[in-house]
Structure formats: structure tokens, C-alpha cells
Amino acid sequence: MKSIKSNLTVISILLLLNNFLLAQSEENDLREFIGKVFNDITFSGQWFLSYQSGRFNDVSDNEFLLKRGYITFQKKFSTRFSARITQDVVVDREGDGEGDIEIRLKYGFLRYQFDGGDFFYKPYVEFGLVSRPWIDFEQSINRYRVQGTMFLERNGILSSADYGLSFVSLLGGELDEEYQKNVSKSFPGKYGSIAIGIYNGGGYHAIEKNENKTIDGRLSLRPIPEALPGLQLSFVCAYGKGNVGTSPDYNTYAGIISFESKPFDITGTYYKGTGFEDGSRLDSSGKPPSNRGYSFFADLNIPNTAFSLIGRYDYFSSELAPVSITSKRFVAGIAYYFFEDSKIIIDYDRIKRNNTINNDDYIFEIAVEFRY
């Protein structure tokens, strides 16, 4: 009997030991799995904080506010495969939740990097909630999104992100390290870059309201990369339907000349198209308006300082017979850079519309863009 009890005791101890070792093994496997998941994850943020005083749509404005916030997580699974999630933090300004801080998704995509070759250099595809071809490129030259959106986005022509599929590639290799270090690391293709994709068409902030898709593309060329690497000629187009159930025509064509250097950056844009991305402003028969406009931007670095002077002029016209609506916007400011590309900017933004009887709208602003 003692022998049987002794054997049972030994067996019980062995079973407990086995269970303990299995538990330890499972815990180690879990730790290893968690380590693999969270390894190579990068985290970054971008915040736009502001004080504004002025008038918009005949309503006086005087407030401190959070203009925007972006929180980004990126995960690299291999040399080819990666993912990105960017949260967009905004203040709800309408409805039951007016005044609440909202978090929505700006980007959420998978990226696959191809080998490429001498011409299509470092090409990749993105699938999900992705960057559209033009705005991301323009904001790499005009670094003042903290002041406001870019010309075509501000006038409802193009969105910065959308649900869809994008192909992006540099052209003909890369510019030298000196240019990328002193001027810009963004889209440093020696002969330019290309981006094209197919999207829902309403932008990341809208629900798809029809079955049509928008094809959107950008081609940027450096005509003389050896002598003037900062000079680029870009052509942008979008073709689809406005994002409403009636699916009105929507197309966009724009030509842009830009020059980037250490002392200054300049851009000039000319746009012509039909309709708006959201399908708004139709006549009684459902016909969209004809639009055109142009924009000029300059960023002058004050030598031997961290200060820059900026100026911008936008003209936009939307014609739907017999009415033509035009707007003229002028922006001027001074920026101080600190902590990498973070900045403080003091700016004045004035817009004149021909369809308003009262005074022009204007905003005086002190804003901070903080990056980390």
C-alpha cells in the first residue's frame, strides 16, 4: 500500500511539474509572439495648436483651439511588407457632439515594396485607406499645413486620403545625399516620381454614396536634375463622378511648377476641371459647374536664422450659368522652426468672395505645429 501511495505521489509530482513546464513554455511562446508583433513598430505624432481672431461667414471668431492632431503607428513585418495606421484627432463642430474631441482614421493601409529597376525605382503599392497622389506630394514642398489645407483640397477638388489602391514609384534612381540632407528627402527620384490609383472618390471623411470609382494620378518630372535638382514639373488629373447618388461628372486637370532649395521654395499651380469631389453645387438638371483657378506659394528662409517668411495667393472660380462664384485668398506669415520640423507661425489669412455683400473674411493666427 505504501508503495502504491509512493508511486501516486511521484506521478502527481511529475504531472504538476509537466503542467508547470508547459505553462512556462506557453508563456515564453506568448512573450516571443508579443515581441515579434511589437518589434519594429515606430510611433510619431503631429499636433496643430492655435489661437485665432477674425471673422468667417460674418461670424466673429476669437478662440484657442486644436486645429488638428495626427497619431501614427507603423509596423515593418519584413523588408518588403509594412503597415501604417494614422489617427486623425479633430474637434466636432456640429450635431449632438459639438465641442467633443473626435478620433477618426486618416490612414490605414498595407504597403508592399517591389524590387523595381533603373527606371521605376523603389516602387510600392498601398491598399486600404491610402494617400492620394497629389496632396501628400504638395505638402512635402509647402510645409505649412498647420496654417490651412492646400489649394485644391481647400476648394473641394481633391482629398489627401481615400479608400482604394495606390501605386507609387521614384523615377531613374535617387538624388544625391547632399540634396536629401540639405533640401528634401521627400520623393527624391532623380528624374521625378509617379503616383496613380483608384479610389472611392469621396475622401477619407466621406461614405461612398454611389458605385463609381475615381482614377487619380500624378506625374512629376525633374527636367535638369544635375544642374537644377529642385525644379519639378508636375501634372495631376482625376476622373470619376461626384460622390452623390446622381453621380454628376467630376474631372480635374492641374499643372504645377515647383522649385525647392535651401534658401527658398516656390510653387505655381493652374487648375481647370468640372464638378466637385463631393458632387455639390449642381443646377436643376444635375449638371456640375465648370471650375478653374490658380495658386502661388513662396517660402523664404531668412539666412543664418531659424525664421522663414511665407506668402500665398489663391484664385478660384466656379461657373454654373448664369452665376459665377469667385474667391481670392491672400496668406502672409512668419515662421520659427525648432525641434526638427516643428514650428511656430504667425499668419494673416484674408479671403474675398464675390457672392458676399458684407466685408471680407479674415483670420489672424498664432499657431504651433509640434512633431515628434
Image: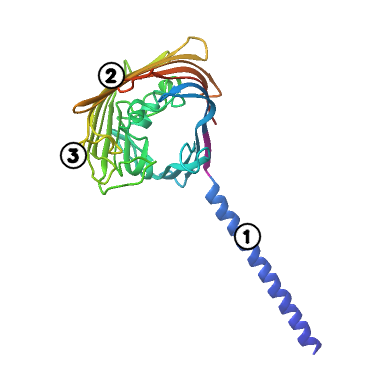
Vertically, is 19 above or below 182?
below
Query: Which amino acid, mark 1?
Result: Glu
Read off the residue under disc 3: 285
Q: Is residue 167 left or right of residue 342?
A: left
Quarter of the image with the N terminus is bottom right
Image position, residue 253 (x, y; %) = 23, 29
Mark pair 3, 2: CA separation? 48 Å
Q: Earlier in the sequence, mark 2 or mark 1?
A: 1
Q: Is residue 270 among the parts visible in the rendering? A: no
Q: Quadrant of residue 288?
A: top left
Q: Nearer the viewer, residue 15 or 267?
A: 267
Q: Is residue 248 among the parts visible in the rendering? A: yes
Image position, residue 317 (x, y; %) = 26, 24
Chain part drawn in magenta: 40-45
Q: Which mark is residue 27?
A: 1
Name the residue furthest right. 2
Read off the residue under disc 2: 224
Helix, strand, or loop for circle 2?
loop
Query: Which amino acid, mark 3?
Result: Ser
Quarter of the image with the C terminus is top right
Q: Earlier in the sequence, mark 3 or mark 2?
A: 2
